[in-house]
C-alpha cells in the first residue's frame, strides 16, 4: 500500500531514510520502504533498532542506536523473524 510518510523512517530494504511527506510503500508485516520496485518488492533487511542489544562484534548497542538486520524469516512456516543488531562501526558508518 502506498502512503504518505507521517514521520521519518528507515527503508526496510535498503536501510536509507524515508523522509516525512514522501510517498512510501507500507505493510504492517514488513514495515516502510521506498516505493521504487527495488525496495518495495525486496525482503525486509533493515529495521530501526528499538531495544538495547549486542552487536556481532560484541559491542553493546543502546536502544535507538544501530540497525536491525534480518537473519532468519520463519513467518511462512508459523515462526517469527530473527533479527540481529549492528553497531555503527559494523554498519559502515
Image: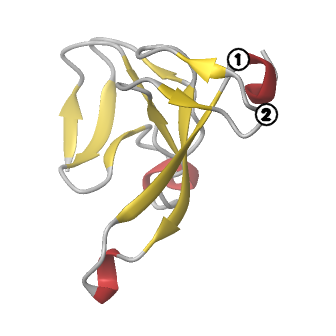
Instruction: Classify residue 5 as left or right of residue 43.
Output: left
- Work out which quarter of the rendered image holds the C terminus and state it: top right
Could you classify mark 1 by the number of other residues whose Cα lies within 10 Å: few (under 14), some (14-19), or many (20 or more)?
some
- Report x, y in % for residue 39: 52, 48
Residue 42, compared with residue 19, is above or below; it is below
Q: Quadrant of residue 7?
A: top left
Residue 3, compared with residue 2, is above or below; it is above
Q: Quadrant of residue 8?
A: top left
Please name the residue that numbered disc 2 is placed on.
57
Instruction: Classify residue 44 as left or right of residue 32.
Output: right
Determine the residue positioned at 31% across, 68% down: 80
Which residue is more in the foreground, 72 or 6? 72
The kind of secondary structure element at disc 2 is loop
- Report x, y in % for residue 23: 30, 29
Instruction: Classify residue 13 as left or right of residue 52.
Output: right
Question: Which of the marked residues, 1 or 2, is nearer the chain's N terminus?
Answer: 2
Residue 32, compared with residue 6, is above or below; it is below
Determine the residue positioned at 49% across, 14% down: 62
Tell me whether the residue at label 1 lies in contact with that at label 2, contact meaning CB atoms closer than 8 angstroms: no
Q: Nearer the viewer, mark 1 or mark 2?
A: 2
Please name the residue that numbered disc 1 is placed on.
88
According to the image, what is the colour scheme of the structure? secondary structure
Determine the residue positioned at 31% across, 83% down: 76
Amino acid at each position: 500500500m502506498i502512503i504518505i510518510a507521517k514521520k521519518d523512517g528507515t527503508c526496510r530494504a535498503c536501510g536509507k531514510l524515508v523522509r516525512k511527506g514522501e510517498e512510501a510503500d507500507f505493510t504492517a508485516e514488513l514495515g516502510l520502504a521506498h516505493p521504487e520496485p527495488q525496495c518495495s518488492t525486496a525482503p525486509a533487511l533493515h529495521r530501526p533498532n528499538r531495544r538495547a542489544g549486542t552487536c556481532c562484534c560484541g559491542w553493546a548497542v543502546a536502544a535507538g542506536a544501530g540497525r536491525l538486520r534480518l537473519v532468519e524469516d520463519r513467518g511462512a512456516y508459523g515462526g517469527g523473524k530473527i533479527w540481529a543488531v549492528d553497531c555503527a562501526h559494523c554498519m559502515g558508518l
